[in-house]
Amino acid sequence: MMRVMEPPPIEEAALAPVSVFWDIKSFPVPDGYDARLVGPCIKRNLRKLGYTGPITITAVGVLSEVPRDILKAVYSTGISLKEVIKSPTNMYALFLESSLLRTPPPANMMVISRPPSYIPRHFSSIRDKDREKGRYTIFPFPFGEMPLTLAISLWEDFLLADPVALEEEKCSEMGDPASWFCAVCHHFAAPDLVTGRDLIVSSRISILDNMHNW
């Protein structure tokens, strides 16, 4: 994955916030991998590329199809969760719909999902127009199609790089308070102003259990 991701094209992009949308169903946490390291791993590699602005990460998908312990682990490290009615087919459009008003330009956008579903057709021209508006895109994969197995392999290689250093960062890189948003019933749960993340996560998952009969 790191062979594809590029450093910021200009200083404005380097200083701007980075919003990451992660397709958690198509690109799951690998078996045996500590899910608490996903967020620090993404942030660490963006920092190494030269992105210095605040980084927010949102895991998107049909959350009932994701193991509960994985949801609790990623949420506990500051990754927000977005429930959708079915697996997204155009992550880029979903990203814009969710982030356009919350993150004014200049801003960076990164989508982790299987190509080509995460980008629309004729994206090169769209990308140029976005840059003119101060919106920059970071891509973990090439624009062209590739087998899902290859894409997942690149994702796993990305997560497994430098595991010792990441283990040291796990506790210090907690990120901002995470939030939940359900695109099925349009329920938004803002960050709690209390301590005890494990209790918060369990309560939030129970709420979604009741709403959607997981």
Image (cartoon, rainbow, N blue to C red):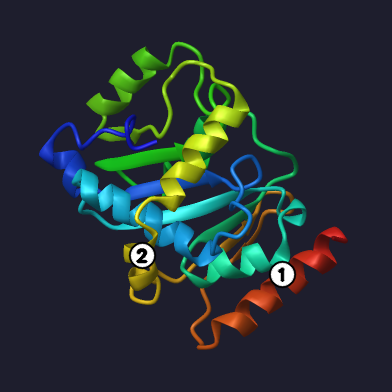
- Kind of residue at disc 1: Ile
Quarter where residue 201 is shown: bottom right
> Residue 132: where, in percent of width, then height?
23, 25
**Mark 2 to mark 1: distance in Å?**
31 Å
Q: Residue 85, position in %: x, y?
A: 75, 44
Q: Quadrant of the C terminus?
A: bottom right
Q: Residue at x 31, y 56 (%)?
A: 44
Label 2 neighbourhood size at 10 Å, few (<14), some (14-19), many (20+)? few
The answer to which image quadrant residue 117 occupies is top right
Q: Is residue 14 left or right of residue 99?
A: left
User: What's the residue at 47%, 69% (across, down)?
Assistant: 77
- Which of marks 1 and 2 precedes in the sequence? 2
Task: Say if 159 sits above or below 177 in the image.
Answer: above
Q: Is residue 113 visible?
A: no
Q: Where residue 107 sits: x, y (%)?
A: 29, 43
Location of the N terminus (image quadrant): top left
In this picture, residue 99 sits left or right of residue 130: right
Residue bearing mark 2: 164
* Amino acid at dot 2: Val
Q: Quadrant of residue 146?
A: top right
Task: Give the labeled residue for mark 1.
Answer: 205
